[in-house]
Image: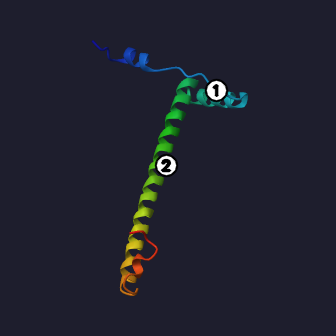
């Protein structure tokens, strides 16, 4: 039987230790104190937000690349259609392996 609730969630969380420069530690502690939250909660929130922002940026870049590739394909097809009527017979295949 699986348990639910805060106790089950606490068991799923893991601790990660890291080294930070002293000025960063002081800044994190000061900021956490101003927000009246534990430093660990502040760091967790910062990491979650940073990962979410990176994911959104990656999706935006991917969407831009797909859109650019689609425009390039459309332009290539348009150019081919334009040139087919102007090139001598067989010229459109020149330089391409059969």
Q: Nearer the viewer, residue 60 or 77?
A: 77
Residue 74 figure quarter: bottom left
Identify the residue shown where x is 43% and y is 68%: 72
Disc marking residue 37: none
Q: Position of residue 54 (x, y in %)?
A: 51, 44
Q: Residues within 10 Å of mark 2 (few under 14, many from 20)?
A: few
Q: Secondary structure at mark 2?
A: helix
Q: Nearer the viewer, residue 79 or 13?
A: 79
Q: Secondary structure at mark 1?
A: helix
Q: Earlier in the sequence, mark 1 or mark 2?
A: 1
| Residue for badge 2 | 57
Q: Position of residue 41 (x, y in %)?
A: 52, 26
Q: Position of residue 90 (x, y in %)?
A: 38, 81
Identify the residue shown where x is 64% and y is 26%: 29
Disc marking residue 29: 1
Query: What's the distance in space between the residues labelled 1 and 2, CA to CA?
Result: 29 Å
Residue 93 figure quarter: bottom left
């Amino acid at each position: 039987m699986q348990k639910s609730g805060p106790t089950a969630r606490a068991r799923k969380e893991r601790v990660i230790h890291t080294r930070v420069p002293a000025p960063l530690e002081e800044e994190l502690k000061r900021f956490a104190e101003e927000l009246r939250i534990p430093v660990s909660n502040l760091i967790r929130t910062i990491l979650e937000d940073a990962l979410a922002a990176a994911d959104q940026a990656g999706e935006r870049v991917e969407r831009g690349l797909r859109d650019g590739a689609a425009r390039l394909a459309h332009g290539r097809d348009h150019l081919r259609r334009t040139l087919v009527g102007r090139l001598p017979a067989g010229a459109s295949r020149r330089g391409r392996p059969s």
